Image (cartoon, grey):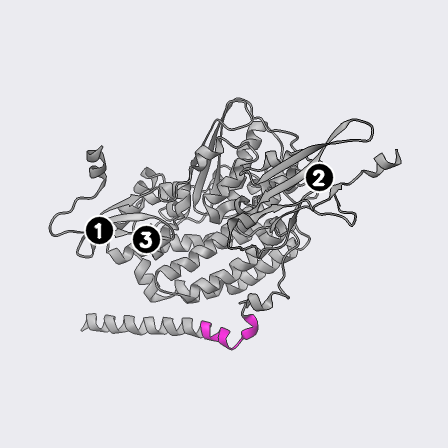
Amino acid sequence: MEQHIESHIIQSSDDEFIINVGPQHPSTHGVLHLQLKLDGEKIVDLRPFLGYIHRGIEKMSESLTYKQFIYLTSRMDYLSAHINNQACCLVIEKGLQTEVPERAKVIRTLMAELTRLASHQLWWGSTGLDMGAVSPFFYAFREREMILEIFEETCGSRLTMNYCVPGGVMNDIHPDFVRKVKQLIKQFRENIHEYDELLTGNPIFQSRTQGIGYLSKEDAIALSCSGPVARASGISCDVRKKNPYDAYDRVSFDEIIATEGDCFARYRVRLEEMKQSMNIIEQLIDNIPTGEYRTKIKGIIKLPVGEYYQRVETARGELGVYLVSDGSNKPYRIKFRTPNFSNLGALKPMSLGGKIGDLVAIMASLDLIIPDIDR
Amino acid sequence: MNAAKRYFTSIFKAIVALLKGMKLTGSYLVRPSKILTQQYPENRDTLYIPQRFKGRVVMPHDENNEHNCTACTLCQLACPNGSIQIISKNIDMPDGTKKKVLDRWVYNLGSCTLCQLCIDACPSDAIVMDNGFEFSVYDKSKLIYELNRPGSRLKEKKTEKQA
């Protein structure tokens, strides 16, 4: 046992230096613990330690009914809370073979894209913050606040909305929803040049991200990276394109792919994704179908015996929900394939050989959410 | 010579970029109408809180101190974290039968995650979400509320009354 633990801790020789980053460190955005072996400023070895925020969501879900466990998934990747809920609802609907009303599909998709926008804006702000630029954070929060107000009006909460229910959505959209979303898109389109002025065009920012944290296409595939991290290395992996769910089959948008594989490519992919999200919202906002927003599922949900899998694209990559049902009113087993866990694996190949100062930029470009890694 | 030139050019470019950013931030200094910061405790009276905002669960009572809760415990079953406890009692009806009525609707705000599943499950619309949000107390036992008012009873349905 002792030996087993020993082998996980990095051993140092005389001229090398071991440093612990985290679990409480401002640039890790949560309780991620990294152990680095340094040769001067150069990173020789890196090992992430997990489990500081493990809450056992998968195990807890086994003791909750199908309607109840959905709210727990908001606490995994809390910035894509709605998309996590959507994935769970989709997997339950797959098992029940219920048809979701068209209106609910479009509302869900709109909310998912708004969530993605809000998540990427927070990421943009915190990326600046990690690299020493404080003002981007406030500019990012300006538009994010508008999105959160839209959530608050329609869903009732700002972050963990629990708006998706099996069969549709919890409430109909607020009467002001369409007007506010249009106002948001208008304001964001007017303001997005400020993002470029403050960060993208800044030579200091560019020199800290260009050519830093290179991830090759082969490595990205081998480490099963997904989302913007993989797309910046030239892999086409958008689940919204490959396996359209809800209303994604009726919208046209571009999958942003860059081939550089460095931090700046990941940055650019996310910025462009925000514009694509706005495109999707604009296509859907004017033609929300009328009709029911929810198919009422009466009584207790019981899925037929079997295994169900559904994957969705969250703001950080591919989330897979694997559900095993034994025919009772509770799931027999749930497994979440979370995007951040796989993307964290790319941290080592990205940062080996680099400087310790670049580690912060690399972690910012990975956009890690620690509760999603540990769940 | 070339290296020195590159070095100074990069410094110059960085300063230009910084000034560009400063210009943008400065432009907001002279346009205070564009600033969104809210001075929270001072603006409490003018604060806009949407009607659907989920603050806590409450049970509306009408002017006769009557509520809609039939103590069916569907909300208690729907609650994922056991924040709801319904204590019912049996009372004797005038015709000699016994009827189960609500005694206490105990709600623990401390463990509630405001997921709205109880309100979704309620068949008689007896509970709704309140818009309040300033609930901090020094002792967590004060977060346990009893939602039905003392002496309240179930609202009789009109059709039953006429019959």
Q: Residue furthest left?
A: A14
> Where is mark 3, residue-wise?
A362
Q: Amino acid at mark 1?
A: Gly
> Numbered disc 1: what chain?
A
Residue at screen point 40% across, 65% down? A134
> Where is mark 2, residue-wise?
B69
Q: Which is closer to the viewer, label 1 or label 2?
A: 2
**Same chain shared by disc 3 and disc 1:** yes
Q: Secondary structure at mark 2?
A: loop
Q: Residues within 10 Å of mark 3 (few under 14, many from 20)?
A: many
Residue at screen point 62% across, 50% down? A154
As drawn, is A273 to the left or to the right of B53?
Answer: left
- Tell me the quarter of the image containing the C terminus of chain A: top left
> Where is mark 1, residue-wise?
A353
The answer to whether marks 2 and 3 mark residues whose Cβ atoms lie closer than 8 Å is no
Q: Amino acid at mark 3?
A: Ile
- Mark 1–mark 2 Cα distance, whole angstroms, equals 66 Å
Q: Amino acid at mark 2?
A: Cys
Q: Residue furthest bottom?
A: B30
Q: Secondary structure at mark 1?
A: loop
Point out the stretch of residues depicted in magenta: B25-34
Q: Examine the rendering and report whether any part of residue A32 can be seen.
A: yes
